[in-house]
Image (tube, rainbow, N blue to C red):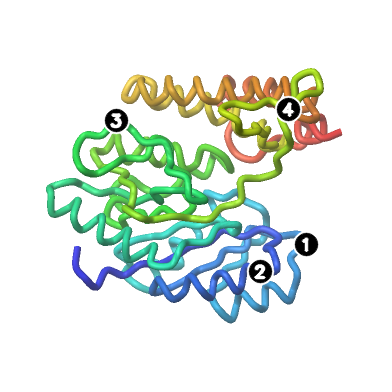
Amino acid sequence: MSAGDRVAAVISVFNPPHDLPDRVARLAGQVDLVVAVDDGSPQADPTVIEGLSRVATLVRLPANSGIAAALNAGIAHVRAAIEPDWLLTLDQDSELDEGFVAKALETARRAESAGLRVGAVTPESHNGRRIDMLRAKDEFHDGFDPMQSGTLISNVAAEHIGLLEEGLFIDAVDSEYTARLRRAGYRVIAGEGCNITHSVGQSRPMRVLGRQVRIGGNDLNVYYHSPFRVYYISRNSIRLTRKYLLSQPGWIAKRLMLETAFHGIRFVFGPNRRKLLLAFLSGTADGLRGRKGRIPAGTEKRINR
């Protein structure tokens, strides 16, 4: 790795928000190239799309293909345009702090100088809160299950292990890639001082018998996922478990424990509990069947009606 590392950012967008062009313009100051991939948006505002095309290279997919396919399409475009050292993947509702990329590269340089095989560098914190880490092996910290948004993937590692798994469509795409990197002997380390601002989704107060639940004086909230998302979460969790249980049993066990707790909170405290439970059961059944790709139309209609 040299001081002149080339970084290309790939952003998956779907019905992009109006402020995205401004955020992409700020991102462009930290990287060598920005590619925005429109994942078949059915209701994209032409003004936003035009704004994106002015600050990034815009790739438009003909149909919604899922975040893995969108990011892979962007990576293919990057590789045809330049020879990147690092691939920075981002969601459309994320923004890096100033100096993020420089700090991530500095962490990677120190880690490689210490003899580590660095496969990816992730944010150290989301919205100012430190992410969950694995038990420390050395001075560098590895994220437990970091999200793909804000992650710099080594292009060398990506050429070695391949790109994102498109069959997952959405959810667990980042988890699968992290597990695959680790299985190949790479480290997925947190960039020191690297913070990303990211939407945490819709939330509502957690209540029991009408009273707000508090722990340590703090109000607890329930973060809502649509039935559509819960289907993929439950289905893809089974695929990950089957693929990595033997090679990374501790990681899989903790991940399953956390998912079980989150599902329990949704079913007890969240809205639309019947639909969420139906989505969970449908996703679990399809996971056991080994189904991949987009949710079947009949299932989607059933869990959303």
How far is the residue under mark 1 from the one under mark 2? 16 Å
| Of labels 4 and 1, the one closer to you | 4
Give the labeled residue for mark 2: 19
Dot 1: what SS? Answer: loop
User: What amino acid type is highlighted by mark number 2?
Assistant: Asp
How far is the residue under mark 2 from the one under mark 4? 34 Å
In the picture, measured across the screen, residue 96 lies left or right of residue 261, that is left
Quadrant housing the N terminus: bottom left
| Of labels 2 and 4, the one closer to you | 4
Q: Is label 2 in contact with label 4 (beta carbons under 8 Å)?
A: no
Q: Is label 1 in contact with label 3 (beta carbons under 8 Å)?
A: no
Quadrant housing the C terminus: top right
User: What amino acid type is highlighted by mark number 1?
Assistant: Gln
Front residue of 15/3: it is 3
271 over 124 or under it: above or below? above
User: What amino acid type is highlighted by mark number 3?
Assistant: Arg
Pinpoint residue 7: horizontal percent, then vertical percent: 35, 67
262 over 46 or under it: above or below? above
Residue at coordinates 39% horizontally, 62% vertically from top-left?
100
User: What amino acid type is highlighted by mark number 4?
Assistant: Gln
The residue lying furthest to the right in this view is: 305
Give the labeled residue for mark 4: 212
